[in-house]
Amino acid sequence: MPGAALRWLGLPLPDQLATAEALLVVLGTRIAVGALPTRALSRWVSRAMRANGGRSAEPPPVVARVTQAVRRASLRVPGATCLVQALAGWLMLERRHVPARIDVGVQKQADELRAHAWLVVAQRIVLGGEDARARYVTLGSHGSTGRQ
């Protein structure tokens, strides 16, 4: 842990603040995912999935800071799954008025169905693996609300 603290102190101040915020948001999201009734969690995720993923060709520069902060924080929060990370990133970007959405997909491996969530900004996957669309079949038409 001392090494992580030293690395954090070595970051520029905006990155330190974003990482501290991300730690709180990822932890809160992880607790919410574990504690909320399924119906409430479903409404929350559905809202994030319907959100506009943005039309612009390039994600705004703040997106890189937010997604990197979420990745750093997720290393410190047990159970910070892809859904927790995508929700935390979406919350942080929404607070900054950056249009984003969460996509959820599935893939079949042997006799098992695996699910994955990723965060999309400006039609680009910014959190959850750039190859997620190639590896997973996106469920439904999440995010296509006519605003994209």
Image: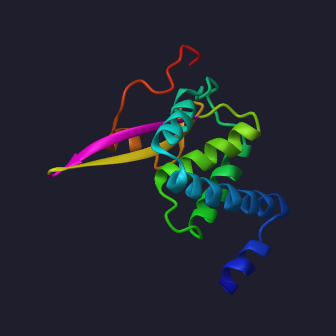
Residue 76 % position (x, y) = 59, 70
Residue placed most toward the observer, 8 or 38: 38
Q: Is residue 68 above or below residue 131?
A: below
Q: Residue at x 50, y 56 (%)?
A: 34
Q: Is residue 134 magenta?
A: no
Q: Is residue 10 above or below residue 39?
A: below
| Residue 131 visible, this orientation | no
Q: Residue at x 72, y 61 (%)?
A: 19
Residue 89 % position (x, y) = 62, 47
Residue 7 % position (x, y) = 71, 76
Residue 133 % position (x, y) = 39, 38
- Is 67 left or right of 15, judged from the image as shown? left
- Is 75 left or right of 65, judged from the image as shown? left
Which range is magenta?
101-110
Q: Residue furthest toward the left? A: 111
Q: Residue furthest toward the right? A: 13
Q: How is the image coloured?
A: rainbow
Q: Residue at x 53, y 17 (%)?
A: 145
Q: Residue at x 67, y 84 (%)?
A: 3
Quarter containing the C terminus: top right
Quarter containing the N terminus: bottom right
The picture quadrant where one finds residue 77 is: bottom right
| Residue 25 visible, this orientation | yes
Residue placed most toward the observer, 15 or 40: 40
Q: Is residue 106 above or below residue 142?
A: below
Q: Main secondary structure of the magenta part?
A: strand
